[in-house]
Image: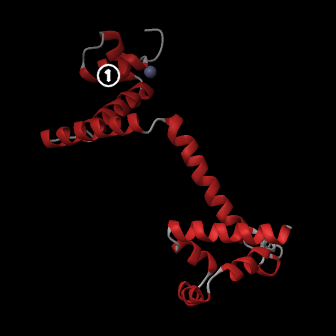
Amino acid sequence: MRGHVEDEMLLDVLEGTAGEEARQHAAACASCAGRVEDARLGLEWAREAEVPEPSPLYWDAFRRNVGQRLEAGRRWRPAVWVPAMAAAGLAVAIAWLPSLGRGPQVTPAPLLPAWSALPPAEQDEALDVMAAAAPVEDLGSVAECGSLSGCLSELSEEETVALANALRSELGESDS
Ligand SMILES: [Zn+2]
């Protein structure tokens, strides 16, 4: 034999199936004898480390689990959940930004006054018109409903038409 026992031959030497030459070399060479011993120990540890076969119940659960994951994967494609996760992360980041600021807290922009479709009462000429048009006995109901808009919303169709006519005539008189 020209050299030491090759790695692929170590198990053959160990099991006694190697050629005569290799077995004689391994018996005479301390280095190769050590490698054969290492191979024997490795084989022993591998046998001890063998995992017992799981019970059939395990495989039932395993199949169910895989099925559920596949089903979930079908619903949650990466194309869907990646942007969703990114958006969630962005929302969290935005929520954390103020607490991360080292300097003074950012002062919030001054709040704009609440938008209203109606002009302020002192600038609303229609209020005077409506007050003039409203019969005196209706003032009690204005107090009941609390606000002009609340009262208007409670008017019947007939009352609304009457009010509109009254407003029209009042405005027409003021225009002339
Ligand atoms: Zn050797």
| Above or below 106: residue 47 | above
- The answer to whether residue 121 shows anywhere in this view is yes
For image coordinates 34% across by 34% down, the residue present is: 70
Answer with the quarter of the image where residue 176 lies. Answer: bottom right
- In the picture, measured across the screen, residue 176 lies left or right of residue 56, that is right
**In the rendered image, which residue does mark 1 sit on?**
11
Of residues 22 and 169, which is closer to you in this image?
169
For image coordinates 75% across by 72% down, the residue present is: 170
User: Does mark 1 have its CB less than 8 Å from ligand 1?
Assistant: no
Answer with the quarter of the image where residue 121 lies. Answer: bottom right
Residue 53: percent from left, percent from top: 18, 38
- In the picture, measured across the screen, residue 22 lies left or right of residue 60, that is right
Q: Identity of the amino acid at label 1?
A: Leu
Q: Quadrant of ligand 1?
A: top left
For image coordinates 34% across by 32% down, the residue present is: 37
Residue 71: percent from left, percent from top: 33, 36
Residue 24: percent from left, percent from top: 33, 16
Residue 30: percent from left, percent from top: 42, 28
Q: Circle 1 — which element?
A: helix
Of residues 14 and 109, which is closer to you in this image?
109
